[in-house]
Amino acid sequence: MSIIAPSILSANFAALAEEIKDVEHAGADWIHIDVMDGHFVPTLTFGPLVINAVRPATKLTFDVHLMIERPELHIPSYIAAGADRITVHAEACVHLHRVIHQIKEAGLPAGVALNPATPLSVLEHVLDDIDMVLIMTVNPGFGGQKFIPQSLQKLRQLRTMLEARGLGDMLVQVDGGINADTASLVTEAGANVLVAGNAVFNEQDRAAAIAALR
Ligand SMILES: O=C(CO)[C@@H](O)[C@H](O)COP(=O)(O)O
Ligand SMILES: [Fe+2]
């Protein structure tokens, strides 16, 4: 059974707390929070102050996807704001191993995200240290983009790599262009955590949208 994590990037920012409560009641498992800095990705979203402001809206896991440069400088602020788990981009970390351990030493599960053009080989020496791999199925920076079909081959390769290392229980998250059609393709290829922005927040019946993803 997949974990469903609606991305608040597609929510109504003027009513963020209500939007979070709404998807919780609709059956969301985690709340996916896209932090973008306008440098690592072109878009600028929000930071710890906004996350902290919506923290009381739910007890669901805040799954924070940091699309920012030099995440090591900001990780303590995101933890203080209420992040329950943090994912950093391999491309944004000169010292990826150190950043992973910074998150874990603070007591949070650590994820590593890979852009579509980044090979799985960057994970080779950190795979035993992490809790989740995020395979980006679009280029990060925007909601509502089209799923990149080559991601399926990457997911299958990751699944093989994980089994070979005895890490078959690892969480494998996908993010970008996930809807009821692509959800079945990615789960078949090995994903077990599905992020969806538009496919949840742009639907009138969000419970039906989440059920369709599941
Ligand atoms: O991290 C990102 C985009 O960079 C995502 O989490 C998006 O928010 C996904 O949006 P959809 O493609 O599902 O609309
Ligand atoms: Fe994301």
Image: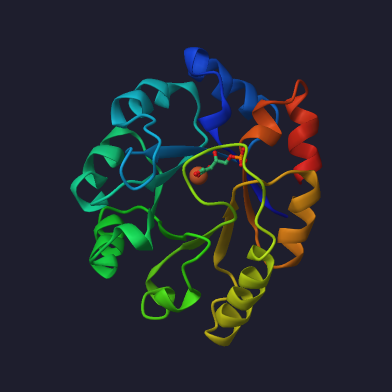
> Measured along the vertical axis of the image, is residue 132 above or below residue 66?
below
Task: State the image quarter where residue 51 is shown.
Answer: top left
> Measured along the vertical axis of the image, is residue 63 above or below residue 53?
below
> Residue 89's x, y, as percent?
38, 57
- Camera-nearest residue between 91 and 129: 91
Residue 94 falls left or right of residue 35: left
Residue in the image at 60% along x and 47% along y = 176
- Extreme bottom residue here? 164
Residue 42 falls left or right of residue 196: left
- Extreme top residue here? 14
Residue in the image at 37% along x and 74% along y = 126
By what rule are the colours in the image chosen?
Answer: rainbow
> Residue 36's x, y, as percent?
38, 39
Total marks placed: 0
Quarter of the rendered image showing ligand 1: top right
- Camera-nearest residue between 29 and 37: 37
> Residue 26's x, y, as percent?
70, 28
> Measured along the vertical axis of the image, is residue 160 above or below residue 8?
below
Residue in the image at 48% along x and 48% along y = 140
> Residue 87's x, y, as percent?
41, 53
- Extreme front residue here? 42
Task: State the image quarter where residue 123 is shown.
Answer: bottom left
Residue 166 falls left or right of residue 109: right
Q: State the quadrant of the N terminus.
A: bottom right
Residue in the image at 50% along x and 27% along y = 58
